Amino acid sequence: MHLKPKNQNGFSLIELMVVVGIMGVMATLAMPKLNTFMAKSKQAEAKSGLSSIYQLQMTYFNAFDTYSTDVGTLGFTMPDNRYTYSMTNASDTGFNAQANVAAGGLGTGCSDDAWGINVSKTLRRLSGTVLTCN
């Protein structure tokens, strides 16, 4: 006696439920990595913005023999508001520019993030050592 007729093809409900359960576990395990990956891709905005500020400061210095104390006077704007940009310690001898993550800029559960660049074009992370997202 056969439990299933020979002409019926397909999966049973139990088999489908097992596959959906496995996919759910895999998705749960992958979410923290995905959040971190997305946040790191957003960090590229801060690094690019600081590189732009550096180039604008060099141009400003060539024109006025001093560095600007405000990113607005450089004509610097970013289309997204993930980071806020500021200038610290600008004078005729150098400058430090900083990018701080705005509230919710990297997504939920991500650690604070701040980057800086100086007159020597040294790009460095100012907060923590590794970006973490839950």
Image (cartoon, grey):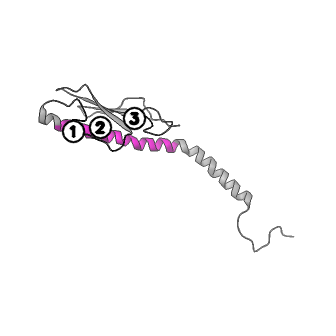
Q: Describe residue 39's horizontal placement relative to residue 29 as left or right.
A: left
Q: Which residue is mark 1?
A: 56
Q: Which residue is mark 2?
A: 50
- In the orientation shown, which residue stands out farthest toward the right? 1
Query: Between tags 2 and 3, which lies in front?
Result: 3
Look at label 3 and name its amino acid. Val
Vertical relation: 28 (above or below) 64: below
Please provide percent x and percent y for residue 65. Answer: 12, 31
Look at label 2 and name its amino acid. Leu
Please provide percent x and percent y for residue 72. Answer: 24, 36
- What separation in Å lies between label 2 and label 1 (alpha carbons)? 10 Å
The disc, 2 or 1, on the residue closer to the chain's N-terminal end is: 2
- What separation in Å lies between label 2 and label 3 (alpha carbons)? 13 Å
Q: Main secondary structure of the magenta part?
A: helix
Quadrant position of the N terminus in the picture:
bottom right
Crowding near pointer 1: few (<14 within 10 Å), some, many (20+)?
some
Residue 35 is a magenta residue: yes
| Picture quadrant where residue 57 is located | top left
- What separation in Å lies between label 1 and label 3 (alpha carbons)? 21 Å
Crowding near pointer 3: few (<14 within 10 Å), some, many (20+)?
many
As helix, strand or loop, the secondary structure at mark 3 comes to strand
The residue at 36%/43% (across/down) is 80
Q: Which residue is mark 3?
A: 101
Foreground of the two, 85 or 128: 85
Vertical relation: 39 (above or below) 67: below
Magenta segment, which residues? 33-59
Please provide percent x and percent y for residue 109. Answer: 51, 36
As helix, strand or loop, the secondary structure at mark 1 comes to helix
Crowding near pointer 2: few (<14 within 10 Å), some, many (20+)?
many
Q: Describe residue 29's horizontal placement relative to residue 126 as left or right.
A: right
Please provide percent x and percent y for residue 26. Answer: 60, 48
The residue at 33%/39% (across/down) is 47
